[in-house]
Image (tube, rainbow, N blue to C red):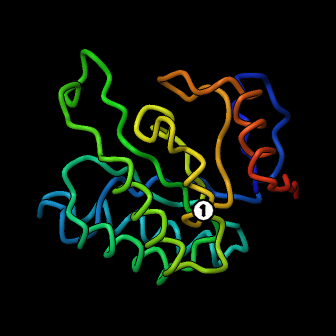
């Protein structure tokens, strides 16, 4: 299991070794004609980063109205790009935002999505991050049983996460080991 700790502390700047890139929630089929160039620019950025020897962390956010077919399309696009790490985020509707009334994905739909990405990416890091707590609730341990091998603990950019002690206890209860690179 890989843990990514969220932090607001200052860090020293070094030549990057990893590129974190959000491709949005989208599969190419979902993008309106006016946005296709934006998507293609992101694909070009991933390819350039790989050519420069960077490890690429690139995934998506789910629960924005995409179909299962579009989730599959995103998984296959990321396979074609040979990204190194895939963060899977799930919409956590926030009051006052355009998606505040969006329905949350059912927990088992999330588990199936994680399993799909693991099946297509058997050797890559699959990270379950944003929306894990609010969408999966008591079923959070299933992320590991369905194929995730990483998570982010602590708070996120716009929402609070679980207490890290509770997440570490869950990992311990599952008899999983924490690795660090």
Residue positioned 77% across, 22% down in the render: 9
The relative height of residue 34 versus residue 135 in the rendered view (above or below) is: below
Which residue occupies the foreground of this view, 73 or 173?
A: 173
**Left or right of 144: which side holds 24?**
left
**Most distant residue in the left direction:** 33
Q: How many marks?
A: 1
The C terminus: image quadrant: bottom right
Report x, y in % for residue 137: 47, 35
Report x, y in % for residue 33: 11, 64
Report x, y in % for residue 42: 42, 63
Residue positioned 63% across, 75% down in the render: 50
**Left or right of 55: which side holds 112?**
left
* Secondary structure found at label 1: helix
Which residue occupies the foreground of this view, 94 or 20?
A: 94
Pointer 1: residues within 10 angstroms few (<14), some, or many (20+)?
A: few
Residue positioned 66% across, 66% down in the render: 125
The N terminus: image quadrant: bottom right
Q: Which residue is mark 1?
A: 145
Residue positioned 55% across, 44% down in the render: 140
Report x, y in % for residue 21: 52, 55
Which residue occupies the foreground of this view, 166 or 76?
A: 166
Which residue occupies the foreground of this view, 15 or 99?
A: 99
Task: Quadrant for residue 2, please give it.
Answer: bottom right
The relative height of residue 106 versus residue 54 in the rendered view (above or below) is: above
The relative height of residue 122 versus residue 19 in the rendered view (above or below) is: below
């Amino acid at each position: 299991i890989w843990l990514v700790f969220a932090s607001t502390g200052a860090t020293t700047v070094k030549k990057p070794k990893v590129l974190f890139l959000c491709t949005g929630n989208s599969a190419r089929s979902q993008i309106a004609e006016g946005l296709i160039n934006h998507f293609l620019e992101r694909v070009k950025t991933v390819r350039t980063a790989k050519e420069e020897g960077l490890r690429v962390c690139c995934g998506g956010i789910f629960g924005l109205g995409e179909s299962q077919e579009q989730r599959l399309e995103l998984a296959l696009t990321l396979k074609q790009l040979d990204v190194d790490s895939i963060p899977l985020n799930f919409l956590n509707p926030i009051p006052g935002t355009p998606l505040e009334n969006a329905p949350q994905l059912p927990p088992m739909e999330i588990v199936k999505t994680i399993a799909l990405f693991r099946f297509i990416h058997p050797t890559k890091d699959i990270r379950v991050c944003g929306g894990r707590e609010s969408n999966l609730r008591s079923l959070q341990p299933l992320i590991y049983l369905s194929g995730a091998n990483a998570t982010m603990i602590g708070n996120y950019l716009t929402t609070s996460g679980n207490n890290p002690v509770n997440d570490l206890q869950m990992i311990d209860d599952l008899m999983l080991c924490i690795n660090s690179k």
